[in-house]
Image (cartoon, rainbow, N blue to C red):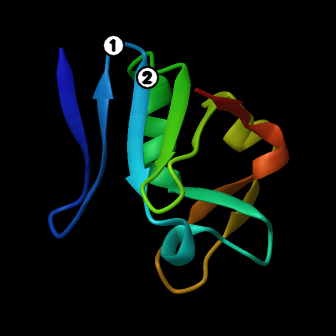
Amino acid sequence: MAYIVGNREKVWGVVHGDTYYRRVNRARHFYRRLGGYAIQREAVLRMLANGVKKVRIHELDTGRRYVAPLVAFITYGELINDGHGEQWVLPLNRFREVF
C-alpha cells in the first residue's frame, strides 16, 4: 500500500512498503550548509511510527539516487528550523548511492 507524505499545501514524497521515496532537484533541495537532505520532523516521526525503514532520494537534475535508513535522520542528522518548520538534515555521507 502506498501513501503520500506531506501537508495541506505540499507533497513531500510517497511511501510504498517500508520505503519513503522523494524526488528532488539537487540545485534547489540540497541543504548546502550541512551537506545533505532534509525531511520534516513531523514526517520522520509519523513514518517511523508506521514502520517506514528507508529513505530513497532521486535527484532529477543529476540522475543520482541515494538510500539511507530513516532512523539515521534522528541518529546522525541535525534538527534545524530555517523558517520552513523543524527538519532533520542528514549529511550525504550517511547515504549510500544506488543505481
Residue 74 position in % (x across, y down): 71, 41
Say which residue appears at 60% left-offset and 31% top-offset: 70
Front residue of this view, candidates 59 and 22 = 59
Q: Which mark is residue 86?
A: none
Q: Are marks 2 and 1 in contact (CB under 8 Å)?
A: yes
Residue 20 position in % (x across, y down): 41, 32
Residue 91 position in % (x across, y down): 78, 53
Quadrant of the image for the N terminus? top left
Left or right of 34, for residue 42: left
Structural crowding at the residue carrying mark 1, measured as other residues with C-alpha within 10 Å and reported as few (<14), some (14–19) or many (≥20):
few
Amino acid at the residue labelled 1: Gly
Considering only vertical position in the picture, is 28 above or below 17? below
Amino acid at the residue labelled 2: Thr
Say which residue appears at 55% left-offset and 75% top-offset: 27
User: The residue tagged with tag 2: helix, strand or loop?
Assistant: strand
Front residue of this view, candidates 33 and 71 = 33
In the picture of the structure, the residue carrying the numbered disc 1 is 17
Q: Which quadrant would residue 21 be assigned to in this image? A: top left
Considering only vertical position in the picture, is 53 above or below 85? above
Q: Which quadrant would residue 87 be assigned to in this image? A: bottom right
Front residue of this view, candidates 7 and 98 = 98
In the picture of the structure, the residue carrying the numbered disc 2 is 19
Front residue of this view, candidates 3 and 51 = 3
Left or right of 89, for residue 47: left
